[in-house]
Amino acid sequence: MRGAMLCARRLGGLRARLGARQVSTSWSPVGAAFNVRPQGRRLDLFGERQGLFGVPTLRAPEGFRVAQERALRRTEQLVARACSLPPGPQTVLLFDELSDALCRVADLADFVRIAHPEAAFREAAEEACRSIGTAVEKLNTNVELYQSLQKLLADERLANSLDPETRRVAELFLFDFEISGIHLDNDKRRRAVDLNVKILDLSSTFLMGTNLPVKAEKHLLPERVWHHFEVAGDHVVVDGLRAEAPDDLVREAAYKIFLYPNAGQLKCLEELLSNRDLLAKLVGYESFSHRALQGTMARSPETVMQFLEKLSDKLSERTMKDFEMMRGMKMKLNPQNSELMPWDPPYYSSLIRAERSSVEPGAYGPFFSLGACMDGLDVLLGRLLGVSLRVQQPAPGEVWAQDVRKLAVVHESEGLLGYIYCDFFQRADKPHQDCHFTIRGGRVREDGSYQLPVVVLMLNLPQPSRDSPTLLTPGMMENLFHEMGHAMHSMLGRTRYQHVTGTRCPTDFAEVPSILMEYFAADYRVVQQFARHYQTGQSLPRSMVSRLCESKKVCAAADMQLQVFYAALDQLYHGPHPRGRCTTDVLRATQERFYGLPYVPGTAWQLRFSHLVGYGAKYYSYLMSRAVASMVWRECFLQDPFNRAAGERYRREMLAHGGGKEPLLMVEGEPREPLSRASSAPLVLLLALAGKLFAVPSAQSSLGRDEALAVHSLCTRIHCVHITRSFSHLFTWAISGFSFPNLTNTPLGNTTSPQHLCREMAIGYNVSFGLKNASLFPVGKPCCAPVRNSKAWGGVLPIEQSEPNLVFLVTCHRTCFPVSRSGSFLGVFTDILTVE
């Protein structure tokens, strides 16, 4: 949810006195802290009790009312100042302080209303969210406040005097006003506020409903499955899908009962989608999706759907093969009922992975104790970014459950960066979600000090037992790394303004740091650093590490196809209304088109799709972010996952900016040195083969070897040209950014694709190009690469008419990916995702 003032993002410990258990004593302090069971704290009748997260007013639920009233009073003061001062940089600082005053209550309340074990706290936090949310929507339609910012940006001299980050933040605030209907008349602005408040209420209700358990009469189920569920009198209580249960009947029962349509939840979803559509049309957009995607990398729902359709087409053959493997496994284990159903893939794909790796999934658990994994994160972050995780003892009342741990994040030279509260363990009424919550954003205060960020990582890990610490599956370990990626984004995004701190950036970029951490979790060089048996300290054998990492590729196409289905469903729900069909009918049609397994009558999976609230019209972000993360991994960490220089570059060019910089600019990287257009004009193509440089001049000019070398030296410093040595036969192209239509008549003709060229040459390559409507053309037979025919080779890069502004081409291994700044993502990133 993002408004001009409210920009909380939920992204999908407490160190107590520790009880003794026989575990390996070789852990680091952070590893040891997470591998022991915390005991209850002694009652302190005389000590002072702090509030939640150290906020004094939050010692009791009533404190939320005090906090929100203070925030609203402060808001009134800041609005008055912003409207009275002449426009200037101070205007943006006041807006950000206004945003911070509201976010510090709303963000904290957003977490507490979902995760606090006490109902009174949850209810008080819910009311605070509603109160602050209403205030935000009114501010978003405050004409006088809007004009104070508009005057700043309308004055060309003032606007040009702003530094890039300040100007971007000002434009983001202005944009939030505009999508909230600031341009409407009074009556319509009030209508927009009412719709936004109603959407907040419906979102909260729907989100709570996604986790509600379902009761079913026991006699409707075979007695042999009762013990897999909680039994309450004559009923069984189903609170999840039991996707990993070995018994097919248990999975089927859980699927059909847990996903049985709830009339109230169904009505809530229909109203939520309808009101979002009404709001979007009221403020001038064709659909809610068109409104939501403004400012993202994708920019439009048409782009997103084309991206999903292309990706689905490229995955389809591999997905069908994955499903056939699963059917074969099910036939082997259950020949009487071998039809593959939607409740089957998680279980049978895990069996296939185990079979391929020749290792039982449970064999990894003793090596992946929670402490070992936290130890691994501490080592990785230290070597890569100079960051360490230090366990701190929370004050009484600071946390909401005794098994929450508090970590201080400390940089080796910069000192304390912020705090992470680790709410990792299952408990009653806790949502079954792995999430990152921003509690407080980082920013530069008025006195020049830095307001440290505070976040919560929420997982659902099993509690440690009397005999062992919490043991993670490989999937749990990967989720832990994923969420820590979000946390590091928050800790290292040292922005001046909290409105763009950390994960407060376009959603389709916010998942990049977290997904990148999954690559580290799947790299044997990283895993072997920390995977040790919790009792003996024995390292996980390298053969098991390698098989585990390789097994992640098994059935990967089917897993990704499921994500495509979810993303497409999200887009269709938020597309133009009226749809003429209920959400279940849309689900059925979309599942048949984008997934390949049959819809199960009498189920409504969409009613459990909690991401429709926080990621409405943006669920595709996981897929697009995965493509960007893959590019970063290959560019920076594939050769050495502990490369400190690459880690510093990653922080400097991506993490540090939060949302204060356009995502595509961060993806392309920073300019090394400015290079004038004229200075690069003579160069058309540089070809490096086995370390030897050859220049191919244009038809209008010729270059000597010395000139070519000089231009090559300059070109390697252009921000969009990176020379990468990553294969035995170095093959690098650098194109200067000009169009040469007279060089397109080549032996291979206009149909030659970059992929075809690469196949013909039978070599690998990895390089980035800067170009605009550029052509590939004959350069003669490469002397060191095997070529099937003796003719000269070349070709024209096909550029579709819908992509006239092509400016950036990325090639990974044997595949090429055009990235358009204009927002046209036809085919963008799909090859990156499918090549893996």
Image: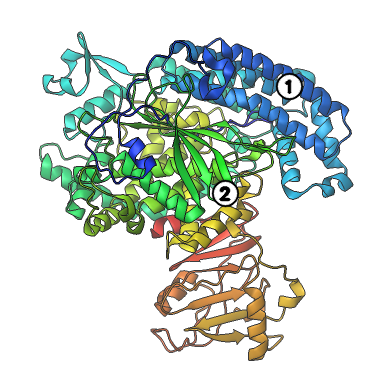
- Name the image quarter holding residue 189: top right
* Residue 652 placement (x, y as % from top left): 60, 54
Q: Which mark is on residue 75?
A: 1
Front position in the image: 714 or 317: 714
Residue 750 at x, y = what percent? 54, 74
Colour scheme shown: rainbow
Q: Position of residue 395 (x, y in %)?
A: 48, 23
Q: Out of 685 and 468, give the one closest to the viewer.
A: 468
Question: Secondary structure beneath disc 1?
Answer: helix
- Horizontal side, residue 535 vs residue 124: left or right: left
Count numbered badges in the picture: 2
Which quadrant of the structure image shows residue 544? bottom left
Along the line of sight, the residue nearer the viewer: 577 or 511: 511
Q: What residue lies at 53% left-to-right and 64% top-to-bottom?
A: 810
Cβ atoms at labels 2 and 1 below 8 Å apart: no
Residue 579 is tagged as none
Disc with the residue nearer the chain's start (2 vs 1): 1
Q: Position of residue 618 (x, y in %)?
A: 53, 38
* Residue 160, above or below 194: below
For marks 2 and 1, give the CA distance.
30 Å
Q: In the rendered image, which quarter contains the N terminus? A: top right
Task: Give the residue type at disc 2.
Answer: Leu
Residue at numbered disc 2: 655
The quadrant in which residue 24 appears is top left
**Residue 187: in sight, yes or no?**
yes
